[in-house]
């Protein structure tokens, strides 16, 4: 059985995704992205083919972003805290280019 990396959703990102994502295709892609992020094997190999998980540059905190789908522009922001993933924000497709602005506007979420 595959090991699962703990995932915490203290800001209600999963519920927010269910409400804000415009269609069922993106909702399903969101859950596929979460499944990849929970897969400890992906973290061990540092290979994230679906989400393209990468660190955001330009911020002091270690903030990572993952694609829900590359084409849609929808992204998930997360952080590693005590070897656990913490979902921090869901970024709309139209705002994905303003990464630093989004992080600075909600800086109380990011440690």
Image (tube, rainbow, N blue to C red):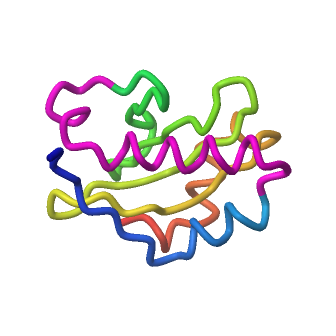
Q: Closest to the observer: 14 or 63?
A: 14
- The secondary structure that most of the magenta stretch takes on is helix
Identify the residue shown where x is 40% and y is 48%. 63
Q: Which residues are magenta?
A: 21-47
- Residue 91 magenta-highlighted: no
Identify the residue shown where x is 51% and y is 66%. 107
Q: Looking at the image, is 98 positioned above or below residue 111?
A: above
Identify the residue shown where x is 72% and y is 24%. 71
Image coordinates of residue 78 in percent, x first then y, are 42, 53
Image coordinates of residue 96 in percent, x first then y, are 69, 39
Quarter occupied by the C terminus: bottom left
Lateral position of residue 69 relative to residue 57, left or right: right
* Quadrant in which residue 94 is drawn: top right
Q: Closest to the observer: 17 or 1?
A: 1
- Residue 26 magenta-highlighted: yes
Q: Looking at the image, is 70 positioned above or below residue 10?
A: above
Identify the residue shown where x is 44% and y is 37%. 56
Image coordinates of residue 61 in percent, x first then y, are 34, 52
Image coordinates of residue 27 in percent, x first then y, are 69, 50
């Amino acid at each position: 059985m595959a090991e699962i990396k703990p995932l915490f959703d203290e800001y209600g990102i999963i519920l927010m995704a269910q409400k804000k994502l415009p269609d069922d295709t993106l909702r399903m892609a969101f859950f596929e992205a979460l499944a990849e992020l929970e897969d400890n094997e992906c973290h061990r190999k540092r290979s994230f083919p679906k989400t393209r998980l990468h660190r955001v540059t330009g911020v002091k905190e270690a903030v990572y972003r993952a694609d829900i789908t590359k084409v849609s522009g929808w992204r998930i922001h997360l952080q590693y805290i005590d070897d656990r993933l913490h979902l921090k924000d869901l970024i709309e497709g139209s705002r994905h280019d303003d990464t630093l602005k989004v992080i600075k506007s909600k800086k109380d979420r990011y440690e």
